């Protein structure tokens, strides 16, 4: 069979399109049927780069790094040092005072490495003061413009993700006229917008149950009006509904689709042609162990099938556009919902070995010097990370893998997700500082984390 571009039908110069842009995910999913120049390459300039840049804070916090670069995304931030506010663009906090010179918002002072400051024209002993940043109160402020989730570039990106993913799962290898409307919107930004934002908080709760925070999740369903739709959850922050076509297309037989990609790049997915097909597999996935008070006791046939829970949850949820409460307006209620989801992603710890390894690498020099955390700092995530390293060093052989550490933390804080509150961070600092040689223990824990394996 001849392969052609799903956007224009050309056979020439087909390339592998990252369905979700490489800079927004730790795992690749590829559609190989997109022409290189007219579509794959141009989409970056048309809308992808804008979204990637505006979501830099999120990808940085979730330790997502494009395979095309060696650095995490940089984002704008305000850093308040001992009451004075400075503005900077940063990719990691450890670079703030080692590499960067920052100018205060009021323009009256600058801060940075002492050797670089002294080389500035006009610098002298009278106007340069050497300070120990580990003894000063430091606070970082970041503001993410939520309008990015409602912009046309985002809508075009979400439509592109849904369209390419659906085509991949249905082995579409040519341009189909039934998709003309969504193709026109993706490629030109014109025509009817097929993308809307889910406003029903219950759906967000449902997705949170099916995936880890910070994950991407895609689900297809056939609506009551027979239209084919894709739900796209971006980082678990905003959920979009994409109307792919007004009816089920004969060439596309798989319309019950599911994919989730978590921040450690692990995937879970399934696909079926109909709900009835999936229902039959769910039924066949269990056998009766016995009966108690008239109730059948069922047991899974395959305990290694990690998708069974997601299949059952999908089957229990009656997806339809009316229940989703979709809209495109950036109203206060929807903004509050997205802000809540964003706060959960940024402020609730997503325990990942990838993130821990990155943190150890960036702080290795300070750890070797016995400097672990600023007692006057307000960076709750950093305190939490140092605590995890501390636990590895303190427990020694009991915590030798990421799974051991995850289990320890879940047991200690009684839950899957840990809210990094001021109270918990203060408790962690006190626990660490109560141990006389806590800096040495953190150094030992850092070695354990460096040796941890991940897929």
Image (cartoon, rainbow, N blue to C red):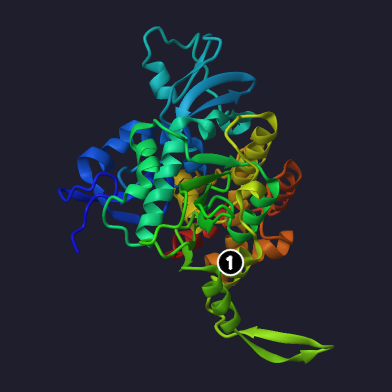
Q: Nearer the viewer, residue 160 or 74?
A: 160
Q: Nearer the viewer, residue 245 or 391?
A: 245
Q: Position of residue 451 (x, y in %)?
A: 44, 64
Q: Residue furthest left?
A: 12
Q: Is residue 271 above or below residue 195?
A: below
Specify whether residue 399 is in view.
Answer: no
Q: Secondary structure at mark 1?
A: helix
Determine crowd level at label 1: few under 14, some 14-19, many 20+ residues with C-alpha closer than 10 A.
many
Q: Position of residue 201 (x, y in %)?
A: 69, 46
Q: Residue at x 41, y 47 (%)?
A: 161
Specify whether residue 248 is in view.
Answer: yes
Q: Which residue is mark 1?
A: 310
In the rendered image, which quarter contains the C terminus? bottom left
In the rendered image, which quarter contains the N terminus? bottom left
Q: Residue at x 42, y 26 (%)?
A: 100
Q: Residue furthest right?
A: 293
Q: Residue at x 18, y 60 (%)?
A: 2
Q: Is residue 96 above or below residue 208?
A: above
Q: Quadrant of residue 138?
A: top right
Direction from residue 67 to residue 339 in the image, left or right: right
Q: Position of residue 218 (x, y in %)?
A: 50, 54
Q: Position of residue 173 (x, y in %)?
A: 27, 57
Q: Quadrant of residue 289?
A: bottom right
Q: Nearer the viewer, residue 21 or 137?
A: 21
């Amino acid at each position: 069979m001849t392969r052609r571009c799903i956007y224009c039908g050309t056979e020439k110069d087909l390339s592998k399109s990252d369905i979700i842009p490489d800079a927004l995910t730790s795992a690749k999913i590829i559609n190989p049927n997109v022409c290189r120049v007219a579509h794959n390459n141009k989409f970056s300039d048309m809308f992808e780069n804008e979204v990637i840049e505006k979501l830099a804070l999120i990808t940085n916090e979730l330790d997502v790094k494009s395979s095309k670069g060696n650095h995490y995304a940089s984002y704008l931030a305000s850093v308040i040092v001992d009451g004075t506010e400075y503005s900077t663009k940063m990719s990691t906090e450890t670079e703030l005072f080692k590499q960067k010179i920052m100018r205060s918002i009021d323009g009256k002072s600058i801060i940075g490495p002492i050797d670089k400051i002294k080389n500035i024209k006009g610098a002298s002993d009278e106007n340069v003061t050497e300070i120990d940043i580990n003894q000063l109160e430091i606070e970082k402020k970041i503001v993410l413009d939520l309008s990015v989730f409602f912009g046309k570039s985002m809508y075009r990106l979400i439509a592109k993700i849904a369209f390419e993913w659906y085509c991949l799962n249905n082995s579409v290898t040519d341009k189909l006229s039934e998709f003309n409307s969504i193709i026109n919107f993706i490629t030109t930004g014109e025509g009817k917008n097929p993308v809307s934002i889910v406003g029903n908080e219950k759906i967000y709760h449902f997705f949170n149950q099916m995936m880890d925070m910070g994950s991407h999740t895609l689900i297809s369903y056939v609506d009551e009006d027979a239209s084919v739709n894709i739900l796209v959850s971006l980082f678990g922050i905003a959920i979009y509904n994409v109307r792919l076509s007004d009816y089920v297309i004969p060439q596309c037989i798989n319309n019950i689709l599911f994919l989730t990609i978590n921040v450690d790049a692990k995937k879970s997915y399934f696909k079926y042609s109909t709900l009835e097909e999936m229902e039959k597999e769910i039924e066949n996935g269990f056998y009766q162990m016995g009966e108690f008070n008239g109730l059948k006791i069922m047991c899974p046939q395959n305990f290694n099938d990690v998708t069974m829970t997601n299949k059952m949850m999908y089957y229990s949820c009656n997806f339809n556009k009316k229940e989703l409460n979709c809209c495109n307006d950036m109203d206060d209620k929807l903004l509050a919902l997205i802000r809540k989801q964003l706060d959960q992603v940024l402020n609730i710890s997503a325990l990942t070995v990838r993130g821990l390894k990155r943190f150890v690498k960036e702080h290795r020099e300070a750890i070797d010097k016995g400097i672990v955390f600023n007692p006057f700092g307000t960076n709750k995530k950093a305190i939490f990370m140092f605590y995890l390293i501390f636990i590895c060093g303190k427990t020694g052989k009991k915590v030798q893998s990421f799974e051991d550490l995850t289990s320890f933390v879940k047991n200690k804080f009684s839950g899957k997700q840990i809210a990094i509150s001021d109270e918990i961070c203060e408790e962690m600092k006190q626990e660490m500082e109560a141990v006389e040689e806590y800096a040495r223990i953190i150094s030992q824990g850092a070695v354990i984390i460096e040796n941890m394996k991940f897929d």
